[in-house]
Image: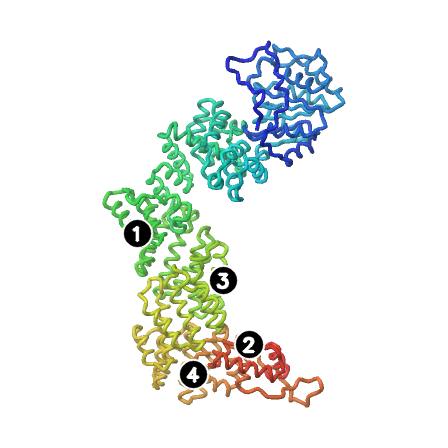
Amino acid sequence: MRADVAVMRSETGPATAEDPLLESRFEFPERLRFMVARPRLTDKLSMRSTMPVTMVVGPAGSGKTQLVASWVTSGAVASTVAWVTLENDDQAYPFWSYVVAALRRAGVAVSPALTPMPSRTTADRSFLIRLAAELSEQRTPILLVLDGVSGLPGERWGAELEFVLRHTSSLRLVLVGRWDPPMPVHRYRLAGRLTEIRSEDLAFTAEEAAELLRMHSVELSADGLASLLAHTEGWAAGLRLFAMALQDHRDADHLVETITGNEATIAEYFVDEVLRVQPVDVRAFLLEISILDTFTPELAEAVSGRPDTRRLLAELSRHNVFVQRVAGHPTAYRLHRLFAELLRAQLKYETSAITPELHRRAATWYAARGLTADAVTHFVRAQDWNGAATTVIDHYAIGRLLLDGGSGRLGMLLRHLPDESDSAEVAIVGAALALAGRSVDGCAVRLQYAQELVIGRNCEFSHGLAVADLILSVLLAEARGERAQLLQMTIAAEQALAQAPPEVAARHPELRMLLLAAKGFASSGLGDLGAACASLTEVAASAAPGCERLRIDALEHLALLEAHSGRLSHAETLAAEAIDIARQCGLDGARAPLAAHVALAWAAMERFQVDAAARHLRAADPRRHVRAGGLVRSAHALVKSRRLQARGELRAALALLDDGTAEKRDPDRPEWLEREIAVARGQLLIIMGRPQDALAAIEGFGEPGPPDVVILRAAALAAMGDLEPGDEAIRTVLASAALPVPVAVDAWLVVATIAARLGQREEACEALHHALRLATPESQRRPVQMVWAHLRRLLRDDDVLAEEYRALQGVSPPAHRATPTAPGPGDLVIVEPLSRREMEVLQGMAAMLPTEEIAASLYVSINTVKTHVRSILRKLSAARRNEAVRRARQLGLI
């Protein structure tokens, strides 16, 4: 900051030629008590001290004078230093009178005859030539510091000074001011002969600010210091005034957030140093544009009404009146944060009545250029809720509001939207916010009110309002589970959207994505899986910004559909993509992609990877996620029940499905999943010896019913001893085209079971062959394991089936071995042969199945498997399972 020395403000009139030159004008400013060492800047000055020109330029209070003073008094300058402090009222004596006097007081030999005429405001050429000649004769370099050059009137002095500098090899200049001096600075810059320290360099760093605060006995946390730096933008005077205000306060961190540019000492500084010296019209201009955060000359002109805004802003920025250019934007400006706070407080105090109008002007300007959020911001600040809501509607931003909800920028701006209004636009926006906040009833009430306003009060129904109304109606129907009605309304909504201006589709792709997603979910719910996959695939493939949540939902639902259809690899790919996008977007906790984990658990369970399924089930446990919908809860229960069944816990598995079917009908639960649960429940009942109850579980699907229901009915009848009717019904199902793989596998397994019971071994083997062939590509082991106890005799007696079964389990066929000969000295020998059950366990070990899965596949306990493993290790003289498998392969056992 500039020292308060030798600064005199004329109270009675300007100085005269008879007044003496004040000695204080040539003294180095006194070092402040709270002076922070800034080696990053003083070192730069020292390293470039041989440059002809050094400029230190910055706004008032940025520490320019103290920086240069601390440098020249540090002993780092190997030159004769002459210092001049210049003032705004330097008129009686010409500029050169101060320069010559400063040189003489610094010890530079300037002849007495070389004196400028006091009565003249400019120097004649003879004086300049003689001065340059005398300075060139000096053996010691001369450093001339001119502090406050921005206050000098006119521009002639700059040309004269540059002339002397150009013809004097020993002279170096340090020019300190609020803006660039009237010299050919560009020429020195291009020649690499200029050192510049500007506002951004003068801004305090975190370390410098912390040191200043320590000098005032103020301690701030890292966050508090960062907040202070952001608030002051590193402005030296602001930091000093804040430090003074924070002294003796225990909770300095909290106080940082409460002090603004309107704080007494800060306001006094701004008013005295900046505002008071501005013309009345410029001061009014600054007050008016203070409502803007960043602005272009065009926006500032729209708000203030001044036609010369571009020139005025450039001048204010050049003169460092706390009007700064925005980095990275060639035409945008902003006010220093503290200065803007003071101006806004002054505007509120002096002319608060015009503030709403200023905001409306800004909002209108933004709205005309399609800048929705900025326009809404200023409409809200003007308390013009109709204008804010109309902007959202007319800009087709309703989709953005629905996707982002109250946490998005628009939602945050409109969080205080009034509940009661005569504006249909306000009611529609309120309905969107309610639906985004999961208030279905609130959305319905506001949407109906908006429709009544339009119809009953003859409100103008703009196209944007029509689109918003239709999209909200579609999404409200989705929330209510009204799927058939949703599909009807989607047609009208898509037609209305197609009639929107062409740029709407490019600017707001989320509108179409919302409709596609709703249509896809509804189609899925109604059982039209082809239409559902078509719509959801388009949503999942979309790269529209801001639609990540929609993409995740679509990918999750598609993953479940693919798992249900038996396309397990694709289901895993889609689920992994959903999880990856969610991770990139930071969606975790309550917003985690639960359905994706359920889909992965489903795929793992179908492959009989029990441990992997358990991991994903834990990740998607609805008990830990209160917002889990019916789709997630039901699918989770289904997969968990299958895992319990694999572990032999049949009662617990059935109880879990019973709880799910007993729940109130959830609009989020699709019909295909309802049927999948019913069929799974029936299969469990058959295994538990309750085929009659299994038939009762599928009564609601009619006769003959969907293919999976037909198959379950046949299995139940077969379990009751009625074999032939079921077999005939299944044969009819198998004749149909496009049968989902899981259904086809189940059908062939039931056919194989019935044939085996009828003693038709050849037909049973053929049916089992079909089932294994269909199940192998996606490793769908679970359905095969469910009937393993009934069909394993066929596998044991048929080498081809056994080989296919081994392929399904992922077990490599045993290598061909020649007839064994007598063992040699280094050959492996098995002393005790393995039993049939031990061979089965060994096959599971070779497939790298965990103990739990081996037990489930063999329908034995885990402890029994562990006993067999220990016996295998002993017989093969192995210490670990992988060693036992390796030795078994060497012996040709597997």
Label placed on residue 805: none
Q: Residue furthest left?
A: 456
Please tell me which of labels 4 and 1 falls first in the chain: 1
Please tell me which of labels 3 and 1 falls first in the chain: 1
Please tell me which of labels 2 and 1 falls first in the chain: 1
Please tell me which of labels 3 and 2 falls first in the chain: 3
Figure check: 235 above or below 588:
above
Give how far apart the Cα atoms at labels 3 and 4 are.
Answer: 36 Å
Label placed on residue 847: 2
Give how far apart the Cα atoms at labels 4 and 1 are.
Answer: 56 Å
At numbered mark 1, what does the secondary structure look like: helix, strand or loop? helix
Residue that mark 3 sits on: 576
How busy is the neighbourhood of tag 2: few (under 14 within 10 Å), some, or many (20 plus)? Answer: some
On the image, the x and y values in percent for residue 353 come to: 35, 30
On the image, the x and y values in percent for residue 427 come to: 30, 46
Label placed on residue 752: 4
The amino acid type found where label 2 is placed reads Ala
